[in-house]
Image: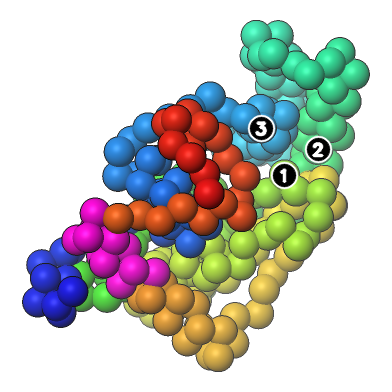
């Protein structure tokens, strides 16, 4: 394939799309290029994640006080329990354990917010889509869960909420992308970024060294180059190491 053919391919991608391609190019083709959705396989994980987002993001959306969150968190549990009723649980035990996990996580999150009350006076952006040019032909975007902006000290603190029980599953490159984009969009501001993991009761703040910055930047560029090649050749090879249901859904053999 000539460089000339690839030159014409421009793109605006979310980090999620980029990561999907890294996991499996064929899955990326189904989800991103064709816009095909299949039923969510892991609804247990989905409902736990939803609890976290409801309790934190909606709380900031409606009010910015720790006491308000303290009083209103049970309302969100009730909503989630209602939502959970329509799901096909594997067993009554699975449903009960998941709801217990949600309650534990939301309670930990509420305690965490009370401890981190310094953020309450700050401007907050919730799940705002942000894009920046990462190469001349690629605009890469993301949706950081929360951004706390302090114009007085010219600083932005990014929180990415994760409902994980094991820190190995955290994707540092995602946090790096948010940090990179917000740095491009807000020159002169100090950008910090961290994972907030209420099930682990931890804040994890990676230290992004210059070497890491360069390696993530190269990874993004290489992936974008591969996407362009696949697009031009209209060939997105399967990478079945990640188990998903897309091949089954499309009745295509997952080799
Ligand atoms: S089933 Fe496997 S090969 Fe097929 S899209 Fe999913 S991960 Fe890729």
Q: Residues within 10 Å of mark 1 (few under 14, many from 20)?
A: many
Q: Secondary structure at mark 3?
A: loop
Q: Between disc 2 and disc 1, whose residue precedes? A: 2
Q: Is mark 1 within 8 Å of ligand 1?
A: no
Measure how far apart labels 1 and 3 are at the Cα level: 13 Å
Residue 166 picture quarter: bottom right
- Residue at the disc numbered 1: 163
Q: Is residue 68 above or below residue 136?
A: above
Q: Residues within 10 Å of mark 2 (few under 14, many from 20)?
A: many
Residue 221 horizontal/vertical position (percent): 36, 76
Residue contact between numbered discs 2 and 1, judged by CB atoms under 8 Å: yes
Q: Is residue 18 above or below residue 60?
A: below
Q: Is residue 72 above or below residue 124?
A: above
In reply to whether residue 233 is colored magenta, the answer given is yes
Residue 21 horizontal/vertical position (percent): 43, 57
Measure how far apart labels 2 and 3 are at the Cα level: 18 Å
Numbered badge on residue 105: 2
Q: Which of these two is toward me, 6 or 64?
A: 6
Q: Between disc 2 and disc 3, whose residue precedes? A: 3
In reply to whether residue 54 is colored magenta, the answer given is no
Residues in magenta?
A: 223-234
- Residue at the disc numbered 3: 42
Residue at 72% across, 44% down? 163
Majority secondary structure in the magenta region: helix
Residue 228 horizontal/vertical position (percent): 25, 65
Q: Which of these two is toward me, 54 or 229?
A: 229
Looking at the image, residue 232 sits to the left or right of residue 194; the answer is left
Q: Residues within 10 Å of mark 3 (few under 14, many from 20)?
A: few
Residue at 81% across, 49% down? 165
């Amino acid at each position: 394939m000539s460089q000339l053919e690839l030159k014409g391919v421009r793109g605006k991608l979310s980090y999620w799309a980029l990561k999907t391609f890294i996991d499996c190019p064929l899955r990326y083709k189904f989800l991103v290029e064709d816009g095909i959705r299949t039923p969510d396989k892991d609804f247990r994980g989905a409902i736990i994640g939803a609890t976290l987002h409801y309790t934190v993001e909606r709380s900031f959306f409606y009010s910015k006080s720790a006491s308000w969150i303290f009083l209103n968190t049970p309302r969100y549990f009730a909503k989630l329990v209602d939502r959970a009723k329509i799901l096909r649980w594997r067993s009554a035990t699975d449903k009960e354990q998941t709801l217990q996990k949600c309650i534990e996580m939301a309670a930990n999150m509420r305690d965490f917010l009370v401890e981190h009350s310094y953020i309450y006076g700050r401007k907050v952006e919730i799940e705002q889509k942000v894009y920046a040019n990462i190469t001349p032909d690629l605009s890469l975007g993301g949706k950081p869960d929360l951004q706390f902006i302090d114009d007085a000290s010219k600083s932005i603190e990014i929180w990415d909420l994760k409902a994980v029980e094991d820190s190995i599953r955290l994707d540092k490159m995602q946090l790096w992308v948010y940090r990179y984009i917000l740095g491009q969009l807000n020159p002169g501001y100090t950008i910090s970024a961290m994972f907030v993991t209420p099930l682990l009761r931890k804040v994890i703040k990676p230290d992004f060294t210059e070497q890491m910055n360069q390696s993530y930047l190269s990874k993004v560029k290489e992936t974008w180059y591969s996407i362009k090649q696949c697009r031009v050749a209209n060939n997105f090879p399967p990478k079945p190491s990640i188990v998903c249901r897309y091949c089954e859904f499309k009745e295509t053999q997952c080799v």
